[in-house]
Image (cartoon, rainbow, N blue to C red):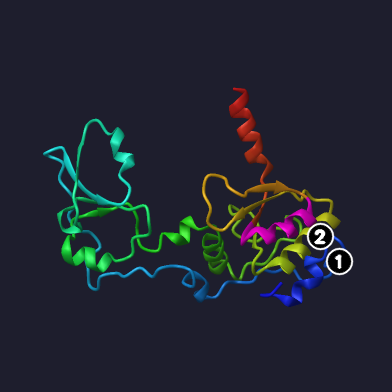
Amino acid sequence: MRTHPEWRHILMHPWIPVDLTGERLEHIVAPDSHFTRSCVPDILPLNAPDVVPGIHLSSKKVHVFGDDLQFFSNLKTVEIVKVNCIEDADLIWMRKHFSDYKNLYEKNPKALVNQYPYDSVLTVKDLLTAAIQSVYRDSVIDPELMHWQPLWFETTFNLETELPQFVAYYQQRARKNMDNTWIVKPWNLARGLDIHVTDNLSYIIRLIESGPKVNSKWNILILLQILVRIIT
């Protein structure tokens, strides 16, 4: 409400219904600043080659620098040696975000990292959505399928920035008697936390109150595949 006071009538929909079936169907393409506003910037080396020599496992020992080495406790064929600085490491294994690739390249260019620059564009749901929509920003919705390009990416709205657009889309699907089941996910939580599958518009609108969400059209084929695996 504080960020978008003009959305008041939409946020009140669970109590006072609003009709947006006459609105234009569109996406709000995120600006470049959306990709950096909540992220620690990755620092990359200048004029570095695309490929550098990797580690050698002839000794079957891997020197690891990291903040969470629990994963390695189950390894049987490789001996793990914990080190206290990146200069001595074969592998950098970080649970928190690793960003200083420039420093790593200057001190230990052969070391491998369990992350890669700008990986948040793929691992954070709203950034992945924004990246795909940016590439296909000129896509026109198919009025029969009610789908934008690319077809392999289910129709998705960022409820922090596209709530009016989502409500208009939902209501126009409803008018066509099309399925309106959606899966609502937080931007960046793991282990299935705060994920909801519903066809209730009022319920979806109220989910905004528990934090930033992206909302994707639920693909019934996924559910069928899960059921088949359980049965067989």
Residue 99, image x, y percentages: 33, 64
Determine whether label 1 and label 2 are within 8 Å by CB.
yes
Counting other residues with Cα less than 10 Å from the Cα at mark 2, is it few (<14), some (14-19), or many (20 or more)?
A: many
Query: Could you tell me which quadrant the C terminus lies in?
Result: top right
Q: Secondary structure at mark 1?
A: loop
**Amino acid marked by disc 1:** Asp
Q: Which residue is mark 1?
A: 19
Left or right of 39 on screen, residue 94: left
Magenta stretch, overall SS: helix
**Amino acid marked by disc 2:** Gln
Query: Could you tell me which quadrant the N terminus lies in?
Result: bottom right
Left or right of 77 on screen, residue 40: right
Q: Secondary structure at mark 2?
A: helix
Give the alpha-carbon distance from disc 1 to disc 2, as whole Å.
8 Å
Residue 121, image x, y percentages: 46, 62
Farthest-out residue, left: 59
Question: In the depicted view, which residue is nearer to us: 76 or 162?
Answer: 76
Farthest-out residue, right: 16
Determine the image quadrant of residue 192: top right
Residue 23 seen in the current view? no
Identify the residue shown where x is 76% and y is 54%: 203
Q: Is residue 7 above or below residue 63?
A: below
Residue 26 seen in the current view? yes
**Nearer the N terminus, badge 1 or badge 2?**
1
Question: In the depicted view, which residue is nearer to us: 217 or 193?
Answer: 193
> What's drawn in magenta, residue-wise?
200-214
Question: In the depicted view, which residue is nearer to us: 208 or 201?
Answer: 208
Residue 40, image x, y percentages: 40, 68
Left or right of 117 on screen, residue 206: right
Q: Which residue is mark 2?
A: 171
Q: Is residue 169 above or below residue 224?
A: below
Identify the residue shown where x is 62% and y is 58%: 214
